[in-house]
Image (tube, helix red, strand yellow):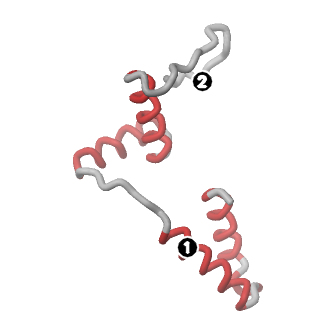
C-alpha cells in the first residue's frame, strides 16, 4: 500500500469514525503507528530547510517532490544515472 492510499484510508476513517467498529478503528490506528514508526527522514540545516520550502512553494510542488527532482538531476549531472532523453517534438507544461 502506498503512503497516499494509506493517507486516503485514514482520512476516510476520520470521516466515518462514528460508524466504524472498535476493532476496525484499532487496525487503522495500529497501521498508522507502524507507518509513522518506519518513516526515516533526513535532518537538514534550517537554512537548507527554508530554501527547499521556498523553492517548493515557488514551483508549486510538494517538498518531497522537489527533493526527488533535485536528487535525480544531481545524479544525472554527476553521471550516477543516465540522462533522460527529452523528445523535442513533445508538448511540455512549461516546467524544467
Residue at position x 35%, y 54% from top?
42
16 sits left or right of 54 in the view: right
Other residues around mark 1 within 10 Å, as few (<14) / some (14–19) / many (≥20): few
Give the SS element for disc 2.
Answer: loop
Q: How many marks?
A: 2
Residue at position x 42%, y 22% from top?
79
Give the SS element for disc 1.
Answer: helix
State the image coordinates of residue 96 (x, y, percent, origin top left).
Answer: 49, 23
Q: Quadrant of residue 1?
A: bottom right
Residue under pointer 2: 93
Residue under pointer 1: 34
Q: Tell which of 85 and 47 is nearer to you.
A: 85
Q: Quadrant of residue 92?
A: top right
Which of the two discs, 2 and 1, labels the residue nearer the N terminus? 1
Other residues around mark 2 within 10 Å, as few (<14) / some (14–19) / many (≥20): few
Q: Are marks 2 and 1 in contact (CB under 8 Å)?
A: no
Q: Using the image, determine if residue 20 lies above or below residue 5.
A: below
Indicate which label's residue lies in the foreground, 2 or 1. 1
Residue at position x 23%, y 52% from top?
46
In the displayed image of the protein, which residue is found farthest to the front?
A: 80
82 sits left or right of 5 in the view: left
Residue at position x 45%, y 39% from top?
66
State the image coordinates of residue 53 (x, y, percent, origin top left).
Answer: 36, 46
State the image coordinates of residue 78 (x, y, percent, origin top left).
Answer: 37, 23
Amino acid at each position: 500500500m502506498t503512503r497516499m492510499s494509506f493517507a486516503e484510508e485514514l482520512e476516510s476513517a476520520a470521516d466515518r469514525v462514528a460508524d466504524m467498529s472498535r476493532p476496525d478503528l484499532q487496525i487503522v490506528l495500529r497501521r498508522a503507528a507502524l507507518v509513522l514508526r518506519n518513516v526515516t527522514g533526513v535532518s537538514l540545516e534550517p537554512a537548507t530547510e527554508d530554501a527547499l520550502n521556498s523553492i517548493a512553494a515557488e514551483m508549486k510542488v510538494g517538498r518531497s517532490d522537489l527533493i526527488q527532482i533535485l536528487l535525480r538531476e544531481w545524479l544525472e549531472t554527476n553521471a550516477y544515472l543516465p540522462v533522460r532523453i527529452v523528445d523535442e517534438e513533445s508538448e511540455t507544461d512549461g516546467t524544467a
